Amino acid sequence: MSAASRVLLAAVFSASFGFNCLAESPTSSGTGFAVTPDGWLMTNAHVVEGCQRIEVKGKGDASDPRVDETNDLALLKIASPEPLKPIVFRRAPTRLGEDLVAIGYPLATLLADSVKVTTGNVNALAGLRNDTRYLQISTPIQPGNSGGPVVDRAGFLMGITSATLSKQTADAIGITAQNVNFAIRASVADLFLQSQGISAQSGDVDKEQPALTTADLADKITPSVFQVLCYGKPDAEASVKPAEMPTSSPQPSITASLIDARGYDAIGFDYRAVKDVSFSECHVTCEGDGQCKAITYNTKYGVCFLKNNVVALIRNGDAVASYASSKAADVIVSDFTSYSGMDLPGGDYKRLRGSNYLQCFTACIGDNSCKAFSYVPKKSECWLKDALGKPRAAKGVELGVK
């Protein structure tokens, strides 16, 4: 057969079977899993960051991405002709040493491109520097595992694979740690879902039911897990997010006389709110007001809060804090994440009456037993919590999770 004939035959074959030798290839990949029957999937924010197009393998392109960069979470919507089988969120608290299973699509371009299962244990009930949003797990994870579910031996969701100990941290401590990986707690993911008006299924383990084998768990959970493909991202291969040792402050940028801290809220000391403004207009308003020492700009609603003092920052994915450089040495940068209109029922061990939000925050941050707090402005009441329960919507409650 001549070269010309081979080219012609290849062209006919390609046209007939829909192949395209020049087809677009994904630049990175991760894992996602169903959280509702009607098409919502959850994954990591860093899996979809910078993607021009997101495909869920076997299900087509995803739409309506919703991202919580602060907690490295994202939601995607797919159009599925059949209802999805959502993974059920676990209500019971996680126990140290529990067996768990991680499911995902690691190293899909190097190993088999099918779903893979690894097993391990809960090594610690917090992440780096006691960050209680995370669990430390021994389950081996690789690039491509990011965003995948971590389930218990009954198949209930315990967490979402997110990070591994970074080389930078290992070099700093002079130890190459083995199997030190991290998963975002399911309760934190549930808070994100509720903030988006999406409800997940939750349940408890039937104590009379024996633990499932790894093979049975794989049969039960893998239909709910999908490979997430990112197109247009500059990285050649998505990697598991490195878990860096937290520093004493966010990475700020200095604009004029104010220091910006994206993803943070400067709590308390509000004396004026300006609506329907841009962040730059909020900045200018503060710089022109001698009383203003800090601002919090709500990116979701375009509201600028001017503050006559600042002592602490708290994580908030919908906010940008800015504060006077003269206050930099006095500002406490916390590991708390704030949520409005949310509560974590249960775990209350102390009530502080007649308090404000800042006092509630300070009481919790200074108490090692405190994992979260709920503040009710209408009652000036603060509840300190030593456990993270099942989150629920609660109007008029300000929640802080350590």
Image (cartoon, rainbow, N blue to C red):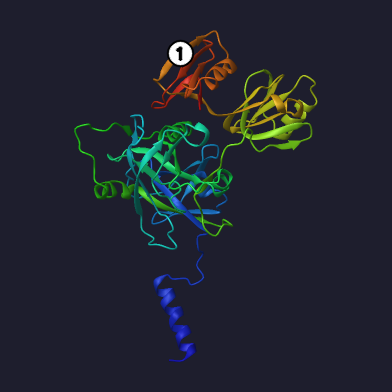
| Quadrant that contains the N terminus | bottom left
Give the quadrant of residue 324: top right
Count of numbered circles in the view: 1
Q: Position of residue 95 (x, y in %)?
A: 35, 32
Instruction: Say which residue appears at 54% left-offset and 22% top-offset.
Output: 365
198 or 172: nearer the eye? 172
Q: Position of residue 269 (x, y in %)?
A: 66, 18
Label 1 packing within 10 angstroms: few (<14), some (14-19), many (20+) = some
Instruction: Say which residue appears at 64% left-offset and 31% top-offset.
Output: 302
Instruction: Say which residue appears at 48% left-offset and 83% top-offset.
Output: 7
Residue 319 in the figure: left or right of residue 137: right
101 or 295: nearer the eye? 101
Q: Position of residue 105 (x, y in %)?
A: 40, 54
Give the quadrant of residue 43: top left
> Image height check: is 42 above or below 317?
below
Residue 370 in the figure: left or right of residue 301: left
Most extreme residue toward the bottom, as rendered?
2
Q: What residue sits right under mark 1 in the picture? A: 350
> Image height check: is 161 above or below 314?
below
Whether residue 43 can be seen here: no
296 or 113: nearer the eye? 113
Most extreme residue toward the top, as rendered?
354
Whether residue 384 can be seen here: yes
Q: Position of residue 322 (x, y in %)?
A: 70, 30
Q: Secondary structure at mark 1?
A: strand
Give the quadrant of residue 250: top right
354 or 140: nearer the eye? 140
Q: Amino acid at mark 1?
A: Lys
